[in-house]
Image: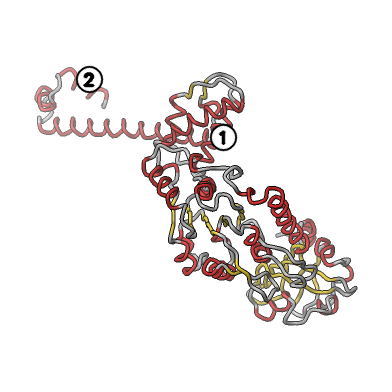
Amino acid sequence: MISKEILSAILQGIDEGIHAVNLSGETIFYNPIAAAHDGLVVEEVIGKSILEVFPSLTRHSSTLLKVILTKKPIYNQVQRYVNLHGKKIETINTTLPIFIDGELAGAVEIAKDYSRLKMLSEKLLDLQQRMQKRYGNNAGSKGSTAYQFSSLKSINPEFISMITGAERLAKSDSPILVYGESGTGKELFVHGVHHASVRAQGPFIVQNCAAIPEALLESLLFGTSRGSYTGAVERAGLFELADGGTLFLDELHAMPIELQAKLLRVIEDGMIRRVGSTKSHYVNVRVIAAMNISPNEALEARMLRPDLFYRLNVLMFRLPPLRERSEDIPYLTDYFLSLYNKKLQKQITVIDKQVRQLFLSYSWPGNVRELKHAVEYMMTVCEGNALTLEELPIMLKKNWQVTEERTMEHQVSLREKIDQYERSMIHQAMLQSEGNIQKAAKLLCIPRQTLQYKLKKQN
């Protein structure tokens, strides 16, 4: 059982604001990180009503009091309030009810400093804008896109056929949905689409939807209007930065459902409205989305709106995992061998046969990325001119050892089954010959001496 002192020490050390109240709304726990967010000291809050310490809040606007009222959790909600000294605070809160023996006892809140997250988001936008000003329309041109379709290395006929089709369809302005396991090359593929499109001279903007908190993603995508929240300024979002080019939204299924509805409207009519603004304006942007799970899986889990999916699946591509194109494993292994020989200035020319066999039998859950990193690691630690089992990364080495053990178990099992079958046949022959070894040997089509040896061996 964890003591109250140990639990308090753990919570005090967590690098996020934690604030807990009882059913009356009085603070029963408040750590220094929460105090720093709120511009207060712990002693000003402990034992006091939350409405006394934060007079701008009400029983309906306070996330803690709302959770006590509804008994339902609230996730990643922005809260703006004023402390007892008049300081304005912004946090992103996850607030949970506290139940003891099935009875509601209070609520606890985990708060992140929204101001800091917002500052990081704005720095990202500023960086994108500076790049665009520096390079003009060439910021996403053919010369600056990191990859082309030729960057996707394969000898698999189906994969090559899909790339050829994608290169042809890239000329279209329709939105695209790409899905496949992590490491299959989705970003390379999307770079290739932009490079082969009529928008190749326009911007190419990338945003991972899982990397930005829900509360910031909308302002990051659509921009902000002055006064839309505390400290807000007129700022273009990623859609405006991508005007005339391509906006690549990775991990689309991590985007909040409500925001997906706004994304659908932009794809439909090209009209965007900055957060806090009443004015809409047109942007000419091609949206390409990617997911590391299948659309059916995302739809069943309600992580993807059906109407958005039907709009995106006009052009849809599934990048197959490496295990489905096994001929690419030795091909890519040799390609990465050559690549890292040049990069590391080495002369490794041989890959041990056992290593190649292991590579072919391994499932590669990290796909091409995992294979690339495995070869890079092996070549970095290799001191000779051949890659052997000794240079394998730890995970692959463990996999090889498990495979060897299973093979040995299978071999032992096979010998035992052969022995059992032989015993059974000899037993039947001896029964039929009523114990006559000569007759039994004829029935088994083996010499009498061989049968005698086997009988002696089998007791």
Q: Position of residue 446 (x, y in %)?
A: 15, 22
Outermost residue toward the top in this view: 449
Q: Nearer the viewer, residue 341 or 324?
A: 341
Label 1 secondary element: helix
Q: Nearer the viewer, residue 120 or 455?
A: 120
Q: Nearer the viewer, residue 413 or 322?
A: 322
Is 229 located above or below residue 16 in the figure?
below
Mark 1 closeness class: few <14, some 14–19, many ≥20 residues within 10 Å: few
Taking 409 as reference, is 187 left or right?
Answer: right
Q: Position of residue 183 (x, y in %)?
A: 52, 45
Is 225 located above or below residue 11 in the figure?
below
Q: Please report the residue visible at 71 percent of the width from the left and 67 percent of the height from the top.
A: 224
Residue 404 is at least partly visible in this image:
no
Distance from Cα at disc 1 to Cα at disc 2:
48 Å
Number of the label disc, if any, that sits on residue 394:
1
Q: Nearer the viewer, residue 103 or 375?
A: 375
Q: Please report the residue visible at 43 percent of the width from the left and 38 percent of the height from the top.
A: 154
Is 280 located above or below residue 13 in the figure?
below
Label 2 secondary element: helix
User: Callout 1, which amino acid?
Assistant: Ile
Residue 27: quadrant of the picture = bottom right
Quarter the C terminus occupies = top left
Q: Position of residue 271 (x, y in %)?
A: 59, 69
> Could you tell which of marks 1 and 2 lies nearer the N-terminus?
1
Quarter the N terminus occupies = bottom right
Taking 91 as reference, is 320 left or right?
Answer: left
Per the image, the residue denoted by label 2 is 453
